[in-house]
Amino acid sequence: MKRHDSQVRTRPFNEIHEKEMKEAQAMLEDLDLIYQSALKSVISSESVLDGFSIKTSMTLCLSGTPFKAIASGEFDSSNKFTYSYFDEQRNKYPNDDPTFVNPQYELFPNMRIFGYNMARFVRNPDVVKECEIRDVKSGGRVFFSLNSFFRTENEENHDLPCRFVYESEI
C-alpha cells in the first residue's frame, strides 16, 4: 500500500524520545569503537616503504611547469631533461614537410602552437621593465616573466590581501 505524504507523521527534533536518543548514541559509540580499532590496523605507505632499503641512482620528477625548480637551482643542466609539445611536433614532422609524418608519431595529434609577446600587451613600460628576465645562457636575450607579471601582493606578506601587484594591467 502506497503512503501519502499526509499520512507520514514527522516530529520535530526536540520531540524525539529519550530512548531513541540513547539508542542512537549507543550506535554512534559502537561505530566509533569499530572505526578506532580499524585505524590501529591501517598500515601507511610510509611505514611500508621504511621496511625496504631502496637505493636510487635517479629520481624522476614529473611536472607541467618544471622551470621554477630549475630556476631555484634544485637541478643543473646535467640532471634535467625536458620534452615539450614543440619537440613532439618536431619529431612528428622531422623534415619540415607536412606531407611526411614520422610513423612513430603519426597517432599524435596535430598541434597549432601560437606564441605571444606578452610585453606588447602591457601598457605601462615600467611594468614591462620590472617583469623582464635577461637570460645569460642565450646571449642576454630578454624575456617577459609571467611569474613576475601575475605575482600577488601576499606572496611575501601573507597578511596582505591576495591581489595582483599589477592588477591595473591585468
Image (spheres, rainbow, N blue to C red):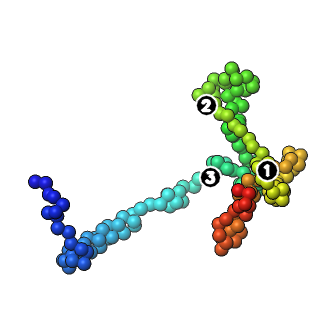
Nearer the camera: disc 3 or disc 1: 1
Chain-order first, disc 2 or disc 1? 2
Are the residues at dot 3 and dot 1 in contact (C-beta closer than 8 Å)?
no
* Image coords of residue 34 (percent x, y): 32, 67
Nearer the camera: disc 2 or disc 3: 2
Q: Residue at x 39, y 65 (%)?
A: 39
Disc 1 residue type (three-letter): Ala
Q: Please say whether residue 111 is visible from this viewpoint.
A: yes
Q: Residue at x 66, y 23 (%)?
A: 101
Q: Is residue 85 above or below residue 34?
A: above
Graded by Cα atoms within 10 Å as few (under 14), some (14 to 19) or many (20 or more), the crowding at tag 1 reads some
| Picture quarter with the N terminus | bottom left
What residue is shown with label 2?
Answer: 108
- Element under disc 2: loop
* Image coords of residue 167 (percent x, y): 71, 61
Task: Please tell me which residue lies in front, 18 or 14.
Answer: 14
Name the quadrant containing residue 97: top right
What residue is shown with label 1?
Answer: 119
Q: Please say whether residue 77 is visible from this viewpoint.
A: no
What residue is shown with label 3?
Answer: 55
Are the residues at dot 2 and dot 1 in contact (C-beta closer than 8 Å)?
no
Give the label on residue 17, or none.
none
